[in-house]
Structure formats: C-alpha cells, structure tokens
Amino acid sequence: MNKAILDKDVQEFIRMNVHLDIIKISLSKSPFPAVSPKELAQQIDGLKRCEKKLPLWYSTAGVYYPEKLALEQCSSEVTARYKSGLIIGDTVIDLTGGFGVDAAFFSKKAEEVTHCEWNKELSEISNHNSEILSFPVRHVQGDGIKYLKTSDQSYDTIYIDPSRRVSSRKVFMLKHCEPDIISEKEHLLQRCRRLIIKTAPLLDLHLTIRELGTVSAIHILSVKNECKEVLYVIDKETKETDPPITCAALNKEHTQSITFRTSAETAFIIGQYSNPQAFLYEPDVALLKAGCFKLITKEFNVNKLHQHTHLYTSESLEENFIGRKFRVLDTWIYGSFIKQQKFIKANIICRNFPQAPDKIRKKLGISEGGSDYLLFCTGSNNELLVIHCTRL
C-alpha cells in the first residue's frame, strides 16, 4: 500500500480524471514522483468500479482502492446490507474479509467485528478504509481459519466466503473450495452460534445442502435480475434438512422476497396450464435458481404456460410479482408467425423453445432492440408460440 497515493494532490488528480481512459493513464507519465502510472490507473479504475456498486466508498474522500479482482469479488452495498440482517449477537468474525465491505456493514449491527485477510496489502487497505469511513472493525492479517484455531474466543456469528477459484480453475463443489468448509464445518460450529457461508450461484443448491448435511436457512440474492450470492445459514444444533429458502431481489429502495421449502414446491400440483392472457411474467433469476416454479402461481395469483415453460400469465396485473412484467399485445402459433411476421427490430426471448435467439434473428432478419418483445416458447398444448409484448 503506497501511502503517497493518499496525498491531497494525488487524490484530487484521481477524482478529476475519473472519466479518462485507464490504459491511457497507465501509459502516460505520472505527475507524481512517488506514484507510478500503474498505481494511478488502479486507483482511477477502482473509483469507477465503486460508483454504483459501493456508492459510500465512491463518495468518500481518501478511500484507497485495491486491484480490480478484489473489487470484482467483494460484496455490493445492497447485498452486504442484507447480510447484516442475518448476523446474530454482538461478536462477529469474517474469516475471509477481502476488501471489507461485509465487515463494514456487520459493524453497524454488532459491537465487535473482526476482519481476517491473508493478503497483507488488502488487509492494510481494508483497515485504512474502515478508519476513513468510521467503521469500528478490528483487522487481523493472516489466514482466518488458522487465527480461529489459535484463539480461545468464540463468536456469535462466523461469516466465511470460500474461494471458488483454486489453482486458477473454477470448482463446483463446496468441499473443493478454499478453505474446505466441509472438513472445517464442525470446528467452526463449535466456535459460534451461527455460521453463514457465502457461495457463488454456480454451486448446485441441493448438492451443497447434501454436502453440508444440515442447513437452517438459505438466502438467494439477486440484483437487477442477476443472481449474485447464495447464503447458507447454519445455527448450532440445527437438524433442518429441508431448510426454508428465501429468494430476495434487491435494489436501493426495497427488497422483494418470497420464502418456501423444497418439499412444498415438490408437493404442489398445478391442475391446469394456461394460454397467454393480458399480462405475462418472467421470474427473477433468484426464483429460477431456487427451483421455485410451481408455488409462485399460488403466491402471486398467476397461471403457468407449460410445465417446462417458466413463464406466467394473468388477466389483471400482479404488481408484486418478482421478475419482469409484460403487457401482451398479440399471440401466434409459430408457423403462422413465420409466414406473416413483419418485425424489423425486437428483443427476442426464448423459453422452452427448440431454437436460440441468435438463430431466430438470423432466420427472420430481426435486429436487436426497440420496445417490442417477442417471446418464443412452448404453450399449454405443447404448441410453439410467439408472444408479442411490451415491457411494463
């Protein structure tokens, strides 16, 4: 960590040049002898990356930014704020602290928060930023698991975000992540009342539940219809094998969520599927990741088009539906649409349809964009449909 970057003139230069090309900055001569062009480019790039993801960090003078990988992997403010509502008690330790966003928000709820990070520079950066942003977080530089094993302290909540990239390759099971949560699980639960494990959406939900054995609750977080995190909450002595799953679609203003159990989804029967009605709905990715395909018809009073077509419809608008909403303008059988279609530009979505959007565009000569949406799908009688909609 180069403290010369924190000088007033350097900080002003970073702010004034935030919209300049990063490559141009890195190849230009630095106006500051103690700060390299590469370091200036890194700070400007970090500032840019935080504008929407971490607006508090972006708007605060004197924040120091790490390499871009740390910013790409860290939580956003909206997900960190949600997770702060899951911790219990007054003592919390983040065993894989990284840039420190989660620990910062934990400190708003808990009296004592410890941040562990093995990367020395990243630990120093997080410590500096905590002071600048007035987050009372204690920083420990080193391996979080090793620190826990050499300490006598127990915590109300342990939070851990194991790496899904091991030796430069992605892994798809929790036991292959670093650290190995499966082998460390019992020891971690001996040292806390609640264990929260963050994983990437790539990991299979039900396989991970089987790996962990018992899970108290699962939270699937999405932002702008992009699945960001899956959180496994394990309370001490829990025996839950069919945990409640909460799907939460987050934004700055509010959170939309639905909670269900896999057993209830499996048992629920849809008696009849529907033709497209006045409004059409595409579920948020958090619902799709959770496998909540049938219960949402009951929760939001909508009808499903087909067993394997995850699109829903209703005669009156269901404002609270979690996902994208459309007004239906017209519907065709696919064969009829092909013969008479006159669209030059449209947004194409395919759900349970034998062709991909790119192939349809090429075949029909439809360019991408505009306000029209064409949804290609399988209908209630196994017929191929094209539904013309506008986004609400």
Image (cartoon, rainbow, N blue to C red):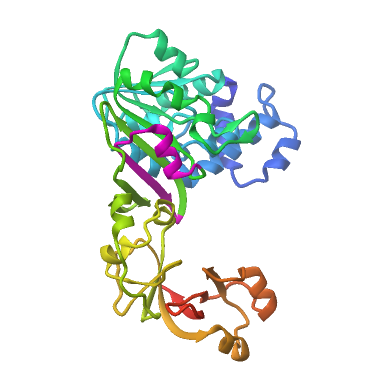
Whether 218 is among the magenta residues is: yes
In the image, which residues are magenta?
203-225
Question: Is residue 98 positioned above or below 223 on the image?
Answer: above
Specify whether residue 137 is in view.
no
Which corner quadrant of the image does residue 32 belong to?
A: top right
Whether 13 is among the magenta residues is: no
Q: Quadrant of the N terminus?
A: top right
Q: Is residue 87 left or right of residue 118?
A: left
Provide residue 383's location: percent of width, then percent of height: 50, 80
Provide residue 238's location: percent of width, then percent of height: 26, 31
Between 367 and 339, which is closer to the camera in this rendering?
A: 339
Specify whether residue 344 is in view.
yes
For image coordinates 30% across by 42% down, the residue present is: 243
Q: Is residue 313 left or right of residue 309?
A: left
Question: Is residue 353 positioned above or below 126 on the image?
Answer: below
Residue extending farthest to the bottom is 340
